[in-house]
Image (cartoon, rainbow, N blue to C red):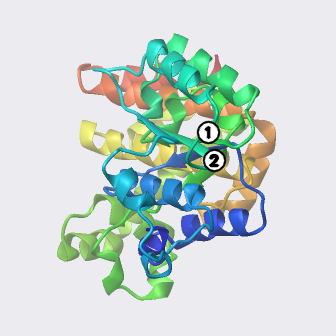
């Protein structure tokens, strides 16, 4: 049940339990999974917590209730799970959900539906679920799971309470709490596969300099816009020289803009606390839509670099696209 995630997903756990204890249940939750391997287990535990008549979060308090077992066996009428049908979640799946949930509840005061892989909603399905979110029915709660929040419509994001799951890494527990707060550590922990590799990354001064260079390029662009093209050789090309280095620089920029989005949405910064003042300033100068669009352009540039020989030209093109 939900208490199983109290330690590994403490922030998400507290957000959910506090909202229910204070009777402030949202009609829709968007769970940003961050690659968490037990995302569906977490979503089902959340659904059980919502559907339980006394909102129990621990099996020890359930007194042999069969609700959780029926949910586990997909045999509870007031919970529906929607998975992609092939590559996409289709409009017909949402229409069927809405038809079923239009009927009176039989087994619970609440109805809950989980959309697994919400970024895979096709255009018509996304518009269909948007109508459902814009005019929420009482006692119906949506749980949307996404591995990539930037592929969702901004209008869907704005109508949900966002819950971010923490990406787990077994290497993290071996390091001092102060080290874990460092910007470079937070980035390296996402890349390293061994303890030795992680130590080498956080000890390498050039690694830190490249992180700072990527952030500096993003800040320079935000100040100078297209005029930054005059200095791309100094600010970018002379630092990120091959495809692997360029990919790394773009990854840092993506993470940086993600923290700008976090600030814009009044969420905790994930990595760049050292740049909190600058991030606060940039969050005021950009709309949510603009930030998401810039992240999409950076992701597209990463994809294009795999297949293009003239990588310097691609970076210049990226700056122009960011401005447009």
Considering every residue shown, the one lying at the far bottom of the view is 176
Q: Is residue 185 above or below residue 78?
A: below
What x and y, as percent, mark residue 320?
A: 57, 19
What residue lies at 50% left-to-right and 26% top-to-bottom?
297
What residue lies at 59% left-to-right and 56% top-to-bottom?
50
Left or right for 215, reference 72? right
Find numbered disc 2 in the image and state the secondary structure of the residue it sits on.
loop
Check residue 105 in the rendering and tell me which mark sits there, or answer none.
1
Quadrant of the rendering where the C terminus is positioned: top right
Q: Image quadrant of residue 306?
A: top left
Q: Nearer the viewer, residue 130 or 230?
A: 130
Check residue 285 in the rendering and tell me which mark sits there, or answer none.
none
What x and y, as percent, mark residue 264?
A: 73, 46
Mark 1 and mark 2 in contact? Answer it, CB < 8 Å. Answer: yes
Q: Is residue 37 above or below residue 125?
A: below
Task: Work out whether residue 274 can be spotted.
Answer: no
Q: Image quadrant of residue 249?
A: top left
What residue lies at 18% left-to-right and 76% top-to-bottom?
196
Crowding at mark 2 (Cα within 10 Å: few <14, some 14-19, many 20+): some
Q: Alpha-carbon distance for marks 1 and 2?
A: 8 Å
Check residue 110 in the rendering and tell me which mark sits there, or answer none.
2
Left or right for 106, reference 242? right
Crowding at mark 1 (Cα within 10 Å: few <14, some 14-19, many 20+): some
Left or right for 21, reference 57? right
Quadrant of the rendering where the N terminus is positioned: bottom left
Task: Work out whether residue 204 can be spotted.
Answer: yes
What x and y, as percent, mark residue 150?
A: 53, 34
Find numbered disc 1 in the image and state the secondary structure of the residue it sits on.
loop
């Amino acid at each position: 049940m939900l208490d199983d995630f109290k330690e590994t997903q403490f922030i998400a756990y507290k957000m959910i339990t506090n909202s229910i204890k204070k009777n402030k249940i949202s009609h829709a939750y968007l769970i940003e999974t961050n690659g968490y391997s037990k995302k569906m287990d977490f979503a089902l535990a959340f659904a059980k917590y919502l559907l339980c008549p006394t909102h129990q979060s621990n099996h020890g308090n359930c007194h042999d209730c069969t609700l959780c077992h029926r949910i586990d066996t997909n045999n509870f009428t007031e919970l529906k799970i929607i998975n992609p049908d092939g590559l996409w979640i289709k409009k017909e799946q949402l229409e069927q959900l809405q038809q079923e949930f239009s009927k009176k509840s039989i087994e619970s005061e609440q109805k809950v539906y989980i959309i697994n892989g919400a970024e895979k909603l096709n255009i018509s399905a996304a518009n269909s679920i948007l109508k459902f979110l814009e005019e929420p029915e009482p006692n119906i709660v949506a749980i949307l799971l996404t591995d990539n929040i930037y592929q969702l419509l901004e209008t869907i994001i704005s109508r949900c309470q966002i819950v971010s799951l923490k990406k787990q890494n077994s290497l993290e527990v071996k390091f001092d709490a102060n080290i874990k707060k460092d910007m470079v550590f937070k980035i390296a922990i996402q890349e390293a596969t061994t303890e030795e590799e992680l130590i080498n990354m956080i000890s390498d001064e050039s690694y830190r300099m490249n992180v700072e260079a990527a952030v500096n390029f993003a800040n320079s662009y935000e100040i100078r816009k297209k005029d930054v093209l005059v200095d791309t050789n100094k600010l970018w090309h002379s630092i990120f020289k091959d495809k692997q280095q360029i990919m790394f620089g773009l990854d840092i920029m993506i993470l940086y803009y993600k923290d700008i989005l976090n600030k814009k949405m009044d969420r905790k910064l994930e990595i760049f606390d050292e740049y909190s003042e600058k991030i606060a300033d940039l969050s005021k100068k950009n709309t949510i839509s603009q930030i998401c669009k810039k992240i999409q352009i950076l992701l597209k540039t990463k994809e294009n670099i795999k297949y293009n020989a003239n990588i310097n030209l691609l970076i210049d093109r990226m700056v122009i696209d960011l401005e447009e």
